[in-house]
Image (cartoon, helix red, strand yellow):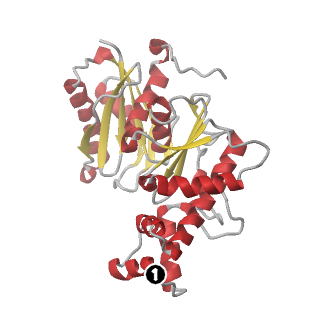
């Protein structure tokens, strides 16, 4: 039996598990409910039980599994394997989740931020498979980021690297929840595009299909904006294009700083497909420098919501399986 590593994606509503073999082929994903009401002991017990259940269903013995990677939302203490806080789960504060899972399963474990794990998943076996340097941008309610540079997750000195949603794209602009002014997230995330559109209707009295939608449904979503923009609504087009313009500015800044092979876009907003890519690429080409053609490609992610659990297994491969696998995808430098 070839060796595998197991990934766990810890979320506030569900916990996902998957085994990934040495050729980076992921097996089926097991999903269990997060027993929020049982607090940290119940959550860690569910993680251990899920690993056992997955190993049984995949016919994996303890000797077949090199280790476990855990992806969890921040803030985390990666060095000590601790979840510092997880607002969705009451009592989940300063919980040594890495050692609890390792102790319960008898397997070595590593902890990683969930956005970084998703980036690593796309790098290993998704849209970033042919890259050395890849940036993942998660476009949803907020904007998250993950950096894989030279084949390794890049954490920065204070494990705060990759917070691309909080790069400033409008100096002196709108106030972000992080305390800065003009963050990318404040202009291009689903939540803030929806808020901007709503403000234009309610405060500036703008009309049209999107305004009708607000009156009818009581709220506007990013999906409403994109669809109304595609159908030719002027207000929707203005809001969507503004979001894509600032996202393009963010992407150009990523190119200037990091020169990655690829920027991979994930998250709910990417369901718009060409409705997102077309305006984004038009703005990107326009705001990009003229010294060269754009050398970094921008592409939609391939693994969907499984990127996190697959990437968590990849984190375990990186931590515990380098010698076993020989790491064929070792970068040249
Ligand atoms: Zn911010």
Which image quadrant for residue 279? bottom right
Q: Quadrant of the C terminus?
A: top right
Residue 282 in the image, given as x and y percentages of width and height: 62, 55
111 vs 170, left or right, is left
Q: Is residue 204 above or below residue 186?
A: below
Task: State whether label 1 is within 8 Å of ligand 1.
Answer: no
Residue drawn at point x = 29 percent, y = 37 percent: 47
Q: Secondary structure at mark 1?
A: loop
- Residue 155 in the image: state x and y as whole percent: 59, 38
Residue in the picture at 31% in, 16% down: 64
Please tell me which residue is depicted at 69% across the width and 55% down the height of the picture.
286
Q: Which residue occupies the foreground of this view, 44 or 250?
A: 250
Q: Nearer the viewer, residue 181 or 185?
A: 185
Q: Quadrant of the N terminus?
A: top left
Give the residue pinned by disc 1: 208
Q: Residue 48: x, y in percent?
A: 27, 33
Please determine whether, in this image, residue 63 is positioned above or below residue 218: above
Look at the image and tell me whether residue 195 can be seen. Answer: yes
Circle 1 packing at 10 Å, graded few (<14), some (14-19), many (20+), is: few
Coordinates of residue 38 in the picture (x, y in percent)? 24, 50
Seen in the image, is 217 located left or right of residue 115?
left
């Amino acid at each position: 039996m070839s060796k595998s590593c197991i990934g766990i994606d810890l979320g506030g509503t569900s916990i996902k598990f998957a085994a990934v073999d040495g050729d980076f082929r992921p097996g089926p994903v097991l999903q269990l409910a997060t027993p929020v009401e049982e607090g940290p002991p119940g959550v860690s017990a569910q993680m251990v039980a899920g690993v056992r259940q997955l190993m049984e269903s995949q016919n994996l013995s303890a000797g077949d599994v090199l280790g476990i990677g855990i992806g969890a939302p921040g803030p985390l203490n990666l060095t000590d394997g601790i979840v510092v806080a997880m607002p969705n789960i009451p009592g989940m504060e300063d919980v040594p989740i890495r050692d609890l899972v390792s102790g319960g399963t008898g397997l070595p474990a590593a902890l990683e931020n969930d956005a970084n794990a998703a980036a690593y998943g796309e790098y290993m076996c998704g849209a970033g498979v042919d890259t050395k340097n890849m940036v993942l941008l998660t476009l949803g309610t907020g904007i998250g980021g993950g950096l894989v540079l030279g084949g390794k997750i890049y954490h920065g000195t204070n494990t705060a690297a990759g917070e691309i949603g909080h790069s400033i794209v409008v100096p002196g602009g709108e106030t972000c929840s992080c305390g800065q002014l003009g963050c990318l997230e404040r202009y291009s995330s689903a939540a803030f595009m929806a808020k901007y559109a709503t403000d234009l209707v309610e405060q500036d009295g703008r009309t049209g299909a999107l305004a009708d939608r607000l009156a009818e449904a009581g709220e506007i979503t990013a999906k409403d904006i994109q669809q109304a923009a595609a159908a030719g609504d002027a207000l929707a087009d203005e809001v969507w294009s503004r979001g894509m313009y600032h996202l393009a500015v963010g992407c150009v800044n990523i190119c200037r700083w990091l020169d990655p092979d690829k920027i991979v876009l994930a998250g709910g907003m990417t369901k718009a497909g060409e409705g997102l890519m077309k305006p984004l690429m038009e703005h990107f080409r326009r705001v990009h420098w003229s010294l060269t053609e754009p050398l970094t490609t921008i592409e939609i992610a391939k693994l969907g919501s499984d990127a996190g659990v697959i990437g968590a297994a990849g984190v375990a491969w990186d931590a515990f399986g380098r010698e076993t696998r020989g790491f064929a995808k070792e970068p040249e430098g």
